[in-house]
Image (cartoon, grey):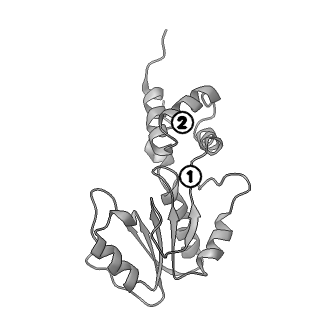
Amino acid sequence: MVNPFSTRFWVAGVLPFQFPEHAETVGTLLEKSRQHTICQIVGPHGSGKSTLLLELLKRYEESGANVRSLFFNDQHRKLPSDLTFQKDQILFADGFEQLPLFHRLWLLFRSTRLILTTHRPVRFIPILYRTQPQFAVFVQIVRQLVSKAPDESALQAVYDCSGGNFRNAFFELYDQWEQPTPQ
């Protein structure tokens, strides 16, 4: 049986971003983002920043906007050599803080439109949204992935152990799923 917690089922962009109750929507964030030339999505590791950024990117693409996505991480910390700054282009930069300072500044000053993700707010850049891990949202996502989810106390233990980092919690659920059941 296929493990429902395999990364192909939950990695950023596969599932829609889950907003907490009474929070924003992708539509309202899209409208807010259009009011800024540069804005940021801020939050801790594994809280959905990349997923939300990809949802906004998808909405901009659907509207016919000229977009380009840039993804930075521990292994990839450079701007692409073919990066050009077109007047009407919107750049989406995931993992902005992974870039060296010079590259971050260059991107900030050369971009005409930029939406970025970062763990800590970048000074003087408006915050579009703050992602905050919440247990209720974690349970919603687990229920999307598996028809018979573990009971909430087991999910609470995994969530607490991961410090609210959804990514790490899903890795733990993957490992638990792979363990043979006692006979």
Task: Indicate the amino acid at tag 1.
Answer: Leu
Tag 1, which secondary structure? loop
The answer to whether residue 151 of the structure is visible from this angle is no
Vertical position of residue 127 compared to residue 46: above or below: below
Tell me which residue sits at (63%, 45%) in the image.
137
In the displayed structure, does residue 120 sit left or right of residue 36? left
Q: Of label 2 and label 1, which has the lower sequence position?
A: 1
Task: Indicate the amino acid at tag 2.
Answer: Tyr
Vertical position of residue 77 compared to residue 21: above or below: below
| Residue lying furthest top | 183
Q: Residues within 10 Å of mark 1 (few under 14, many from 20)?
A: some
Which residue is more in the foreground, 49 or 140? 49
Which mark is nearer the camera, 2 or 1?
Answer: 2
* Inter-mark Cα distance, 2 to 1: 19 Å
| Residue lying furthest front | 123
| Residue lying furthest bottom | 87
Tell me which residue sits at (27%, 57%) in the image.
75
The residue identified by callout 2 is: 159
Tell me which residue sits at (48%, 28%) in the image.
177
The residue identified by callout 1 is: 15
Q: Quadrant of residue 7?
A: top left
In the displayed structure, does residue 144 sit left or right of residue 78? right
In the picture, the disc for residue 93 is: none
